[in-house]
């Protein structure tokens, strides 16, 4: 018997129809973006683009209609995502809400929370960020120390989150805090909260609420993630998500969404496409071999990724298969810039140069983060080893 | 999984796990023909899964047959099971009824001078075919050669050609066959298949078998590292070992998926979806599998230490096949270049369209 099953999945006809609609939408709304801008992939964000997707019903499209969703199948959502990623569309603003925060609220949130926090997401008007990591808690997430202390009517938050992508622009944060200490069980006593960072109209609420955001500049010189400090930040009881102290199992369910999507192997696709364009102009046997090898990986990863989507759709838990796709996917995403450089003998550049050179310049640097974000390579391989029965 | 697929998987795994032992493999390497093994697979209907019912087969599709090919790779079955499955299917495609007994195939696209000739109402074949798997052993050989815009398929009986024996690294027969106006027993034209089908489908067989041998290498490695103790604990408890085996598991999973993707597309193509691109997926599967073979074999050996370097340990039966199979019917680079050329022809703007056309 095969250890892992990546069974072929037949996508429903509705998915093919949607794929066509998305392609037409992208011709209208994404054709003018430069290859370098496209290379930002799902980190690239454009609130206007998100609103246009919202108008089409393409954010939270699998959610219940009463929360603004369309009740479409997860296969349709999958097709939408891969088309957006391959086109390098600026989907970053709504990405985490669509992927994990919305499903979290649907699974664990109160009715009032769903009513308030889901419909604006589907309109492309409310963006989320994720406050999990802390300065002393990276891979070892259960060690988070930022405290939510029970007070009358709510909680007082003290501590610090870090690497929080988009905290400076987001309206909302889903954060993991410690609500009690249990010496015998680190996983006990964690709780998730939904925090208001901005009014729907964009008015900043953070400092007023005791939340302070400091930009952290990435090595590319970009402002993408942040440090977020909480100083006696008051959060009303209504903002607790799910059950108090039970945040760990909720977060684990959330991570399954975070790790299993097509964004985990497609982040460097723009460079692959630029390589193909360059090779059409100037064909070499070495170039063909390099591209063919990468496309063999691409075809394989897509087969695996679609199959994981099939398992999710069938209500199975593909945590192991998802980890395999993310591990191989990040290797693939990181190989592309290296191979591009070997194959074309051009220097990666920043700011000027050909599309190939610029996209390479961006991805040589940015891709180092692809095996860190969302669970590091070593952590994923640990999950796979556990699946093999070694741990 | 379809019912028939589950049944085939159970049958092949049960039979081969019982019969194919290290002793049998050792004897086979010394030239013994494992008749009992052949009888078992033939009697259980594993040799002709792809042949239509009207020609005496089971009428399965490639996704079903894949589990048998995978099993043949997994257990290092020292018989031409994969070759017979393909040879019988090629006959069936030409609407010829396959004979019983072990078969292999030789193809005129790589062995350019292999040619059919009509002599009155009979047909003859002439030319040389190199490195034909099990060419010295099989009862019948299926010969393919493009002729007048068609892919001609003929059946030649053992003894009608000269054999010079050779072997691959795994001591599987890879023989040179010389045909000198050899009589062709049955002849026909295979429809819907490209001229280089011998190499193309040969590559697919090997890609799937590699997936099986990888799976076995992983299985043996997990057993070994859980059993072998050093520094007071099973070596599988060391994180460095775990991280290596996780990468081996990645490769196993990827090669399985690549083979599945190829088989799924062939099944669509054969159901008449002409736009479906078999070559694209088979090239990808063989390129991916050949790459995985080397990487995975070295991880498996590393985990096994010196024990895995002995003839006594069973691991080498899988890894020597991996190193052989990755080169047979085109190396990874051969197929990567072919695929790359095709990708450049398709163009960056249409690549994704092409990839999603078969959903
Ligand atoms: C671009 C980017 C965006 C991010 N966005 C967010 C966000 O929006 N919200 C958020 O909460 N977090 C975010 N993160 C943080 C991310 O989740 C962490 O980087 C990740 O969990 C790893 O934590 P760390 O960086 O502290 O590394 P560490 O955990 O300190 O790891 C450093 C190295 O040690 C290895 N290591 C650690 N533990 C083990 C172990 N047990 N066994 C073997 N090796 C080990 C790791 O694999 C890694 O190689 C982001 C990170 C990046 C790079």
Image (cartoon, helix red, strand yellow):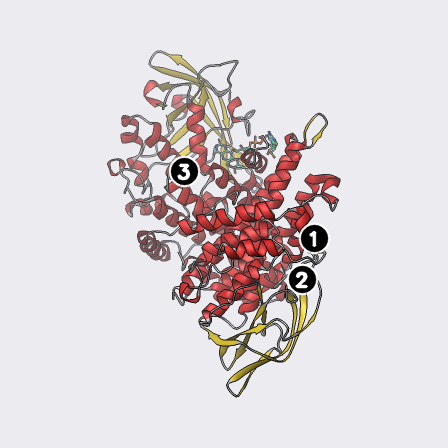
Disc 1 to disc 3, C-alpha distance: 45 Å
User: Is residue A172 or residue B297 the one in the foreground?
Assistant: B297
User: Is residue B336 or residue A364 the one in the foreground?
Assistant: B336
Residue B210: mark: none
Judged by depth in the image, the label closer to the viewer, 2 or 1, is 1
Say what secondary structure mark 3 lies in.
Answer: loop
**The quadrant where residue B233 appears:** top right
Q: Which residue is mark 1?
A: B27
Give me the chain letter of mark 3.
A
Residue A299 visible in this rendered orientation of the protein: no
Give me the chain letter of mark 2.
B
Q: Which residue is mark 3?
A: A316
Disc 2 to disc 1, C-alpha distance: 14 Å
Number of residues whose C-alpha sits closer than 10 Å to that of mark 1, classed few (under 14), some (14–19) or many (20 or more): some
The residue under the point 42% across, 23% down is A247
Residue B214 locus on image (x, y percent): 60, 48
**The quadrant where residue A155 appears:** top left
The residue under the point 50% across, 60% down is B281
Number of residues whose C-alpha sits closer than 10 Å to that of mark 2, classed few (under 14), some (14–19) or many (20 or more): many
Q: Which residue is mark 2?
A: B173
Let me know if marks 1 and 3 both belong to one chain: no
């Amino acid at each position: 018997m095969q250890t892992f099953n990546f069974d072929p999945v037949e996508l429903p006809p509705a998915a093919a129809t949607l794929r066509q609609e998305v392609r037409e939408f992208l011709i209208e709304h994404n054709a003018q973006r430069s290859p370098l801008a496209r290379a930002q992939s799902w980190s690239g964000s454009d609130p206007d683009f998100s609103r246009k997707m919202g108008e089409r019903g393409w954010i939270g499209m699998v959610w219940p209609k009463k929360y603004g969703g369309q009740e479409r199948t997860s296969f349709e959502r999958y097709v939408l995502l891969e088309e957006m990623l391959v086109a390098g569309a600026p989907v970053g603003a709504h990405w985490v809400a669509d992927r994990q925060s919305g499903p979290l609220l649907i699974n664990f949130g109160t009715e009032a929370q769903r009513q308030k926090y889901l419909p604006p997401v589907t309109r492309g008007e409310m963006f989320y960020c994720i406050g999990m990591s802390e300065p002393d808690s990276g891979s070892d997430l259960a060690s988070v120390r930022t405290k939510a202390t029970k007070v009358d009517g709510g909680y007082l938050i003290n501590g610090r989150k870090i690497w929080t992508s988009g905290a400076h622009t987001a309206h909302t944060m889903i954060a993991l805090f410690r609500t009690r200490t249990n010496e015998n069980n680190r996983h006990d006593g964690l709780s998730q909260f939904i925090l208001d960072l901005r009014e729907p109209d964009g008015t900043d609420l953070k400092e007023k609420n005791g939340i302070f955001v400091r930009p952290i500049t990435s090595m590319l010189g970009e402002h993408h993630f942040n440090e977020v400090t909480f100083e006696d930040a008051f959060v009303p009881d209504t903002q607790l998500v799910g059950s108090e102290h039970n945040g760990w199992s909720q977060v684990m369910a959330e991570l399954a969404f975070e790790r299993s999507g097509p964004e985990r192997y497609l982040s460097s696709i723009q460079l692959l496409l630029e390589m193909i364009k360059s090779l059409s102009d100037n064909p070499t046997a070495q170039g063909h071999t390099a591209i063919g090898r990468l496309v063999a990986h691409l075809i394989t990863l897509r087969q695996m990724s679609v199959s994981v989507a099939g398992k999710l759709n069938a209500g199975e838990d593909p945590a192991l298969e998802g980890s395999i796709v993310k591990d191989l996917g990040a290797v693939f995403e990181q190989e592309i810039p290296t191979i591009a450089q070997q194959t074309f003998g051009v220097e990666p550049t920043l700011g000027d140069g050909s599309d190939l050179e610029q996209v390479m310049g961006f991805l040589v640097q940015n891709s180092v983060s692809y095996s860190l974000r969302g669970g590091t390579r070593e952590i994923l391989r640990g999950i796979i080893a556990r699946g093999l029965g070694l741990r | 999984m379809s019912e028939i697929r589950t049944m085939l998987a159970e049958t092949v795994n049960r039979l081969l796990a019982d019969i194919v032992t290290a002793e049998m493999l050792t004897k086979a390497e010394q030239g013994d023909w494992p008749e009992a093994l052949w009888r078992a697979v033939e009697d259980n209907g594993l040799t002709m899964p792809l042949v239509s019912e009207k020609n005496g087969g089971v009428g399965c599709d490639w996704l079903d047959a894949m589990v048998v090919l995978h099993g043949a790779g997994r257990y290092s079955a020292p018989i031409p099971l994969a070759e017979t499955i393909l040879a019988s299917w090629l006959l069936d495609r030409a609407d010829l009824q396959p004979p019983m007994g072990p078969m292999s195939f030789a193809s005129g696209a790589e062995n350019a001078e292999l040619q059919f000739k009509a002599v009155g109402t009979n047909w003859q074949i002439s030319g040389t075919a190199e490195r034909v798997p099990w060419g010295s052993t099989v009862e019948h050989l299926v010969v393919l050669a493009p002729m007048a815009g068609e892919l001609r398929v003929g059946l030649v009986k053992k003894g009608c050609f000269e054999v010079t024996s050779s072997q691959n690294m795994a001591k599987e027969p890879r023989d040179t066959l010389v045909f000198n106006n050899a009589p062709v027993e049955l002849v026909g034209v295979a429809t819907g298949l490209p001229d280089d089908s011998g190499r193309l489908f040969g590559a697919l067989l090997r890609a799937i078998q590699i997936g099986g041998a990888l799976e076995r290498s992983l299985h043996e490695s997990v057993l070994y590292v859980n059993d072998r103790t050093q520094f007071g604990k099973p070596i599988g408890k060391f994180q460095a070992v775990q991280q290596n085996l996780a990468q081996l598991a990645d490769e196993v999973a990827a090669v399985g998926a690549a083979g599945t993707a190829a088989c799924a597309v062939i099944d669509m193509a054969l159901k008449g979806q002409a736009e479906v691109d078999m070559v694209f997926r088979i090239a990808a599967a063989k390129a991916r599998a050949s790459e995985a073979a080397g990487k995975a074999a070295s991880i498996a050996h590393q985990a096994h230490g010196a024990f895995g370097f002995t003839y006594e340990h069973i691991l080498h039966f899988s890894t020597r096949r991996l190193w052989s199979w990755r080169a047979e019917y085109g190396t990874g680079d051969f197929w990567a270049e072919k695929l790359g050329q095709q990708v450049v022809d398709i163009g960056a703007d249409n690549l994704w369209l092409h990839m999603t056309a078969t959903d």
